Image (cartoon, helix red, strand yellow):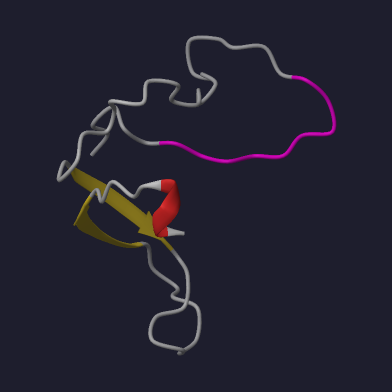
Amino acid sequence: MYNGNDIALVILPGGQEEGDNIKYAKRNKDPNVPAADERLYISGWGATAGGPQSDILLGTVVNYLLLKSSDG
């Protein structure tokens, strides 16, 4: 089910214009977004706990932690 949040990362040899079905992902430049403790949805096919890479898309919800530059 499409919910308006689906994205894909594709590396092309040349440029691609935006259209009805292709939109560029834009970097956030607002330092107030996301807000501290805001819930973020993350997903991927990476390895879990040192095991093999997943064959299915995994996802979870995490809280955004605001770190100061002195936190490293």
Residue 5 lies, in percent from the top left, at 31, 32
Give the mark count: 0
Q: Residue at x 43, y 25 (%)?
A: 28
Residue 16 position by quadrant:
top right
Asked if 38 appears above or below 21 in the picture, the reply is below
Magenta residues span 7-15
In this view, the residue in front, 11 or 41, is 41
Residue 13 lies, in percent from the top left, at 84, 33
The answer to whether residue 44 is left or right of residue 34 is right
Residue 12 position by quadrant:
top right
Q: Residue at x 39, y 80 (%)?
A: 48
The answer to whether residue 68 is left or right of residue 27 is left
The quadrant in which the N terminus is found is top left
Asked if 15 appears above or below 65 in the picture, the reply is above
| Magenta stretch holds residue 51 | no
In this view, the residue in front, 25 or 2, is 25
Q: Residue at x 36, y 26 (%)?
A: 31
Residue 51 lies, in percent from the top left, at 45, 90
Residue 55 lies, in percent from the top left, at 45, 73
Residue lying farthest right?
13
Q: Main secondary structure of the magenta part?
A: loop
Q: Residue at x 29, y 28 (%)?
A: 33
| Magenta stretch holds residue 12 | yes
